[in-house]
Amino acid sequence: MAAVFGMLLAFGAPALPAQFAAAADRQENTRCTGAGAADYRWQPLRIGGGGFVTGLVVHPRTPGVVYGREDVGGLVRWDEATSSWKQLLRAGRVPDPRAADYGVESVAVAASADRVVYAAVGDGGPDGRVLASRDRGAHWSDGGQRWLVEGNNDYRTGPERLAVDPADARTVYFGTRTQGLYVSTDAARHWTRVAPAQLPTGTGGIGVVSVLFDPSAGRAHGRTRGIWATVAGAGVYHSTDAGHRWQLVYPETARTPTDAKIADDGTLLVAFGPGAGAASSIRRFTAAEPAGHDLTTPLARGGSWFVAVEPGDSTRLLAADDAVRAGHLFRSADGGASWQPLGLTLDYPDASWPKATNESGWLSTGTLVFDPTAPGRVWFPQGIGVWRAADAFAAEPVLHWRFVSAGIEEMVTYDLVAPPGGDPISAVADRNGFRHTHPGTYPAAPILTDQFSAGTSLAYAGLNPRYVVAVSSDTRAQYAPLDAGWTSDPASGYSTDGGATWTRFGGPKSEITRRYGGNIAVSADASSIVWMPTIPADYAADPANAGRPGEQAQPLNVPYVSRDNGRTWTAATGVDPGPGIHDMIWWGAKRALTADLAARGTFYLATTRGDGEFFRSTDGGSTWARATGTPPPTAGTDAHVFGQVHAVPGRAGNVWESTAQGGLWYTRDGGGSWTRAAGVQQARAFGFGRAETPGGYPTVFANAEVGGVWGVWSSTDRGATWTLTARHPACYYTGVNVVTGDMDASGRVYVGFTGNGFVQGDPARSRH
């Protein structure tokens, strides 16, 4: 099917025949769920936005054709009728689907064919690719060429590396990070590199940053004559003969282009970030003045500028630096000769939780894009979704932004618990986490804090499930040394009402801020909390970090115990500190710690040191000892990244552990002996749901490989047999960080992705 579609893609071919489209639709469900999979219905556990929409492209002629690219969440298309977005990267519609596709580095549309769209996808490996569609992303083809594509790396925001000749939808340019500029003349089926002597590769792993066609330049042999390209470490290049020859018109080796936009009359704006003592700037280029000249920037000192030029009127500009906020958004009505500062208001017609955060003080900028089909309208993709303003040049010097992110679910998930009798509670990157009262209802606010923070772990007390604990960390801490003296308020805490309200852990800030992230657990009777923080290995290994002036030195990378709801913490004994327990905050799937949900005061801890260790505490987490049995082996596996340990609800001493390539194991006696689950070749995230029959063993759900097939599997007989729930839940084929069930609803499963939020799956025929 993919080969047939690839042949049909060439511009000018007839539309995809109905029989092929129907066949693709019939095959999609099987490709998403897998042959023999259970009959499930999937729905998003709605949050609304939440991830970085790094760029946005509006079709220059057809109203309502808008695409947003996401750093970890894929590619979405706007639906004006429903004011919502639709995910286009679905397992049944993309050839050879791979999780790396959800890092979208660039997208381009064809002015002469409004159903054609191209997307450069990849997450940093050498197998990045350009996907092509001629039905607005309903189906895709892959020409087979491979590049280094990094949809989630530095310089992922701003301009587009992909560009389609407005005169010929078959001619596509792609500016790569490390391999130079490529051109295809057959709709991305085959590619040729532009000679490095004509246009260089670029530097710093940034490469060719943007390619733009000048629609006013006329045509030669059916193609647009004028093309501009910006190159990191080199400058601005111009071609006046449809790409046959390129000329360096503005050398720039110290600063990197951060944005580039072009108007219908050929006016090009290029923004440069600061570098090597040189300030950032915005430079204007035209065919008559190819070397360009700098505009007066709105601020004497700005960050990395992002610009927009109205396609039909090159005198009307917008500019913002690293973040849209008070005093950092400007417009010009005279081509940049003067600038007017703009105020802003924020409206939330759908998901309103950003209103309960500090987001308005720092709307991290992806870019600014005028809508060619609606004069004055501007789109603003950024760190938590997409905003739109109706008229950037209204008389009032205020931009009224509407949060138009319905349908975008781009949270990076870290954890989810579904306490019996309560609502699911999630932990996510960047915005802590949410309580989900209904899958179709957007949460009103994050839990615990309004700050930019990463919620890394959750737990509830097995005998008192309304008592819930959560770890959340100032996200900035993962990018700075811990000895820098963080003084931010602790963002972790507990709830006694199932997550409806929260109380932050107290205690001296120095005690809290030296620990962040990692995993947390609470005893079955809620009498003690154990926190296994994550500490970067290089920090923990440095003796200078063992203590600070006026503080008692304590080992960092060991469990900590609190018996007063997190007000004070004491280092546990019996577990040697150091690497191998939980070293990195951004390993979202890692779960090293759990509490017995039926036995009071009992906790379990799994490490990947040596060939794996398994510890148990029976005194509320204060002292630990190795369990007597030989633990699941972890040597030579990815258990340090994907391994998890979870206690079985209602079953004292029952604990399961996933060890990635080492499979899935369980113990029924607290680690005295272990059994490997039959047929499971590899296992990552897993969790438990309601038993299929009253009094039966809880259902095990796992992201695992069984019989050579990866997917979400379930077992109702303690791992003796397995049923495929779905290869790709809800047709997402991205990575999975979270899988767990629901003790109140038989068969229900929650799946959390590495950039697409959560989905809830229920059997099509209820097994209640």
Image: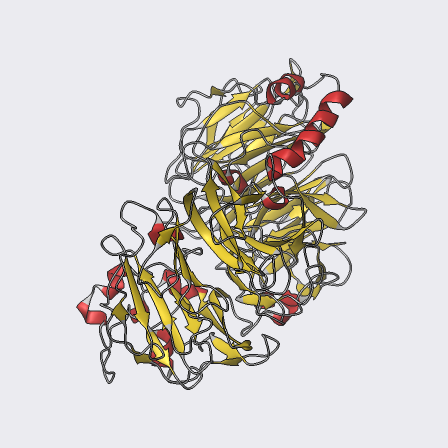
User: On the picture, is 346 further left or further right than 524?
Assistant: right
Residue at screen point 62% across, 49% down: 368
Q: Quadrant of the C terminus?
A: bottom right
Q: Position of residue 352 (x, y in %)?
A: 69, 65
**286 relative to 712, above or below:** above
**129 relative to 658, above or below:** above
Look at the image and tell me whether residue 466 can be seen. Answer: yes
Q: Position of residue 392 (x, y in %)?
A: 72, 54
Q: Quadrant of the N terminus?
A: top right
User: On the picture, is 625 further left or further right than 164?
Assistant: left
Q: Position of residue 580 (x, y in %)?
A: 27, 58
**117 relative to 308, above or below:** above
Q: Position of residue 307 (x, y in %)?
A: 59, 48
Q: Residue furthest right?
A: 81
Colour option used:
secondary structure
Look at the image and tell me whether residue 90 can be seen. Answer: no
Residue at screen point 30% across, 50% down: 634
Q: Residue furthest left?
A: 543
**420 relative to 601, above or below:** above
Q: In this orientation, which residue lies closer to the viewer: 502 or 592?
A: 592
Q: In this orientation, which residue lies closer to the viewer: 47 or 250?
A: 47
